[in-house]
Amino acid sequence: MIKEINNKEVNLKVQDIVPRKILNKMMKRSNTSALLFLCIHLTYLAVTGYGLYLAIDTSWWLMMSIIYGLGIVHLFSPQHEFSHRTAFKNRWVNDFFGWTFGLIIALPPVFFRWEHTDHHSYTQDIEKDPELIPTPSSFLTYLWYITSVPYWMGFFKSFIPHLLAIIPEKEAVFIPDTERWKVIWEARFMLILYSTIAYLSLYYNSTIAVEYWLLPRLIAEPLMRMVRYTEHAGCPLNNNILENTRTTLVSAPYRWLAWNMPYHAEHHMAPSLPFHALPELHEHVKDKLVGTANGFIHAHLDIIRAIPVNKI
Amino acid sequence: MLDKWIKIANIADVEEDEVMLVTSGNYSLALYKIKGEFYATDNICTHGNACLTEGYLDGNIIECPKHQGRFNVKTGKALCSPVTIDIKTYPCRLKNMSEVEVNLF
């Protein structure tokens, strides 16, 4: 269904839908849940990584790289949760894993945290949301986004200035003065780290980093783009928490890999709510949500239907 | 002489280890009950435009939902980046063992 752009201000809050007492109980952080999901994710990587090892030099290599890469790119899910500091009870544990996974997927953790906060503040605000993925203007634009080329272009457009100690004007609105040195030095640290890995790979004539990290990371990114597309694209450009974000109902194994992030509308309703409580919040709000998709195909059909008819 | 103390809630309104939004005139306050004691602070974070009552209360620490800045709700002290300015606190007292009053002046 094509949704009309609606800029009407709706100051609805999750407390207007779910009693605060219930929210408070759901808000409790759980090391057990975080460790469980972490174990599931690392097990996925270990098993598919072993599969990739067996498939190297066979015709199964590409398929296993994609399957294993799916686990690599989905490290974004816990990294995102760590950036909210809602996974573990302890802040430094969240920050430690946030840093680790950020380095693996090349997502600068400090920069992402500030950018993402603004995304939550200005969700679907076409001028202010720094992570806004626009509804595609044509089917080609839709496919172009999925290639991940725009994503990597955006990455370097931000990363290179940071290396040069430049905070672009559009980022200066959400990165406080006191945090800018961290953004600059994390970019430099990442460059040093990746350069060292490249140097060591060449020195030892090793393909390990390429086969088990770089290629799977790059090959699977389009899958992550397809997932990220479903979170907001095609949803109304307003601040109504029931409309501007899409929850996609998916199978349990995928929810585990994505740390419940397909419950995305629920996450935006209550960013302080830990990932493990999102299914419970869904039960409280599901009847009020607009545009919940029954699976990724449904979600993508929603996005494609939102493309202006003469551009399909 | 003006009575500086204003009723803002009934004791039963707030559960243990919880925070509740209360308003009085132009004031928007966060009312906390921690180990049977009541505490009140401004509701709006001193850093970003966010309501502390939507945040995470862990012991006597309230974490802002927006940037995860933290305040000690008993003293109002800003505890970590990015918050640097303390949050204003208001004295609380119980009246007739059934009402919570706050001193806004």
Image (cartoon, coloured by chain):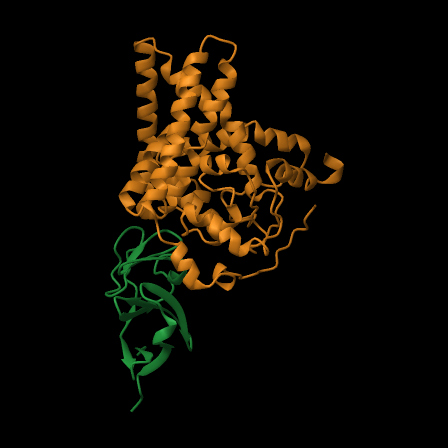
Chain colours: A orange, B green
Q: Is residue B79 left or right of residue A39?
A: left
Q: Is residue A272 above or below residue A230?
A: below
Q: Residue sitting at 39 percent across and 57 percent down? A: A25
Quadrant of the frame with the N terminus of chain A: top right
Q: Is residue B23 above or below residue B78?
A: below
Q: Residue furthest right?
A: A310
Q: Position of residue A98 (x, y in %)?
A: 34, 38
Res A163 visible: no
Query: Going 70% across and 40% down the picture, which residue do you hit?
Result: A305
User: Whole-percent x and y of residue A64?
Assistant: 48, 18
Question: Along the horizontal axis of the image, is A71 left or right of A201?
Answer: right
The furthest residue to the bottom: B1
Percent x, y of residue A241: 54, 54
Query: Within the image, what quadrant is residue A210 found in?
Result: top left
Q: Position of residue A238 (x, y in %)?
A: 59, 53
- For image coordinates 34% across by 23% down, the residue present is A194
